[in-house]
Amino acid sequence: MFFRKATENDINSIEELFNDVLTLEEKEPSVGWIRGVYPTRATAESALGRGDLFVQEDGGVLVGAAIINQLQVDVYADAPWEYPAADREVMVLHTLCISPHTRGKGYGKAFAEFYEKYALQNDCPYLRIDTNARNFKARALYKKLGYKEIDIVPCTFNGIDGVQLVLLEKCLK
């Protein structure tokens, strides 16, 4: 298994990955994403254009994707962060998407570990993540990995109304 920055050649596979998660979401709601709203092909293309889209491969198959950057979403501004870090010291994981066909193989944990190493390599010891309050699997994973839930903020997020957004953080110092 390995991680790398995404290329234009990955966009179709990432869109397929999003669609697999959205199909599961329509059957078993958990992540709070909505087909045609978020995430979309345009989400991946925008991240690719910024150079902050990453993929996870295993055996030549794309099994995960995420956006990793220092862009803190607007609802982060008033959060009661435990670590009042300078923006230049904060790395954020957005839109972590693991293939639902690979459940139980540790890919989510591995991607989070990659994110932490990437943050340290870029001199960002403060990590921030958000997830939908009803995404119990992600919340449990992040807790197991040492992330602390800081707040739950009601908001419209990525074009989706009524989101209860859980804000999480971790310090690697």
Image: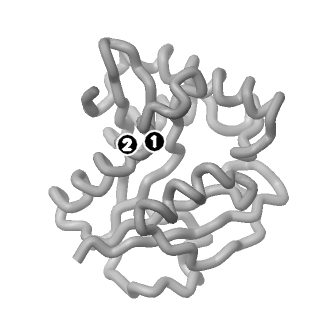
Which residue is denoted by mark 1 in the rendering? Answer: 108
Relative to 42, is 155 above or below? below
Q: Where is residue 122 in the image (x, y as percent from the top left)?
A: 18, 59
Which element is circle 2 on?
A: helix
Give the quadrant of the N terminus.
top left
Left or right: 125 as drawn, with respect to 29: left
Q: Position of residue 4 (x, y in %)?
A: 26, 32
Q: Where is residue 151 in the image (x, y as percent from the top left)?
A: 63, 78
Q: What residue type is labelled 1?
A: Gly
Which residue is denoted by mark 2 in the rendering? Answer: 111
Relative to 173, is 7 above or below? above
Relative to 38, is 69 above or below? below
Q: Would you call the spot at circle 2 few (<14 residues within 10 Å), some (14-19), or many (20 or more)?
A: many
Q: What residue type is labelled 2?
A: Phe
Q: Which residue is drawn at the image coordinates 77% and 69% (left, top)?
A: 154
Left or right: 1 as drawn, with respect to 31: left
Left or right: 82 as drawn, with respect to 122: right
Q: Residue 19 carries which label?
A: none
Give the quadrant of the C terminus.
bottom left
Q: Which residue is drawn at the image coordinates 68% and 52% (left, top)?
A: 135
Q: Position of residue 98 (x, y in %)?
A: 51, 33
Snapshot quadrant of residue 18: top right
Relative to 157, is 125 above or below? below
**Distance between the alpha carbons at the discs numbered 2 and 1:** 5 Å
Snapshot quadrant of residue 35: top right
Furthest residue toward front: 104
Q: Would you call the spot at circle 1 few (<14 residues within 10 Å), some (14-19), or many (20 or more)?
A: many
Q: Are marks 2 and 1 in contact (CB under 8 Å)?
A: yes
Q: Which residue is drawn at the image coordinates 27% and 33% (left, top)?
A: 3
Q: Which residue is drawn at the image coordinates 46% and 68% (left, top)?
A: 147
